Image (cartoon, grey):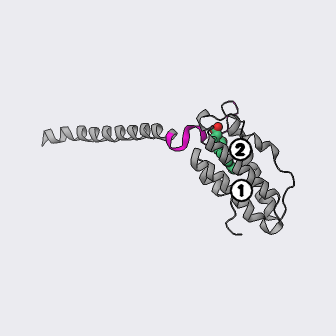
Amino acid sequence: MVSFLKSKPAIVFIVFLCLALLYQFNSFHKEKIEPTKNGSSCSIKEPLNPNGDSELALLMREMYDTSVSLKTSITKGILPRDFPQRFRSIHSAKPTDPTVKTETFKILADEYLKGLKALSNSKKGELKTNYNESVQKCINCHEAFCPGPIKKIVKLKFTEI
Ligand code: HEC
């Protein structure tokens, strides 16, 4: 009995140690997995770090913000006339991870620019559909290269047309 009482704290201590180790292992594991899952290059960093961000990441943020304001305008039935020419620099902007600049990237980037062009030529009745299609082009590329922000991008779409 005495020895049992003596060993009880030891057991509690060992259990605690195991839990702590398990926790440690889990967070270690997570750190290891995260970059491959989301692509180390494409997390949505908050707060933003202007020194560490690639040209492409900065352009993407601008594209995201432009999409938000486009959506607001389209809700009011207005389409800003100026096609954002600077988004063409999606081809030349340096990414965090240089290996993303493949032939597939090029094709998907052109698809996106085409979608934007189609949107800028839309009739009033087609605005929401064409806007959603242009957002889908963002998602298509993200599925291939950078799944991290997809959840956020999907929210840009109109759910009712
Ligand atoms: C042709 C491929 C492609 C298209 C099209 C594309 N993206 Fe991206 N996006 C990327 C890649 C690659 C990154 C990673 C950039 C980096 O870190 O260098 C990225 C990063 C991002 C990020 C994270 C930026 C950050 O803070 O690090 C957001 C948000 C984003 N894109 C939104 C969008 C939106 C919105 C659109 C459409 C309007 C879009 N993307 C279209 C490939 C694409």
Q: Is residue 84 left or right of residue 44?
A: right
| Viewer-proximal residue among 70 and 114 | 114
Ligand 1, by image quadrant, is top right
Inter-mark Cα distance, 1 to 2: 16 Å
Task: Give the quarter of the image for residue 77.
Answer: bottom right
Q: Is residue 146 visible?
A: no
97 up-or-down from 72: above or below: above
116 up-or-down from 27: above or below: below
Q: Is residue 159 visible?
A: yes
Mark 2 surroundings within 10 Å by alpha-carbon count, few (fewer than 14), some (14 through 19), many (20 or more)? few
Choose the circle earlier in sequence order: 1 or 2. Answer: 2
The residue beneath circle 1 is 134
Quadrant into which the N terminus falls? top left
Image mark for residue 106: none
Query: Which of label 1 and label 2 is nearer to you?
Result: 1
Q: Position of residue 3 (x, y in %)?
A: 14, 38
The residue beneath circle 2 is 61
Label 2 near ligand 1 (CB < 8 Å): yes
Question: Residue at image x 69%, y 57%?
Answer: 156
Residue extending farthest to the right is 81
Q: Position of residue 27 (x, y in %)?
A: 44, 39
Q: Is residue 160 left or right of residue 35?
A: right
| Viewer-proximal residue among 104 and 25 | 104
Residue 43 drawn in magenta: yes
Q: Position of residue 78 (x, y in %)?
A: 85, 62
Q: Is residue 7 left or right of residue 96?
A: left
Q: Is residue 103 left or right of residue 114?
A: left
The magenta stretch spans which residues?
A: 36-51
Question: Which amino acid, by three-letter code, is at mark 2?
Answer: Arg
Q: Position of residue 44 (x, y in %)?
A: 62, 43
At numbered mark 2, what does the secondary structure look like: helix, strand or loop?
helix
Label 1 near ligand 1 (CB < 8 Å): yes
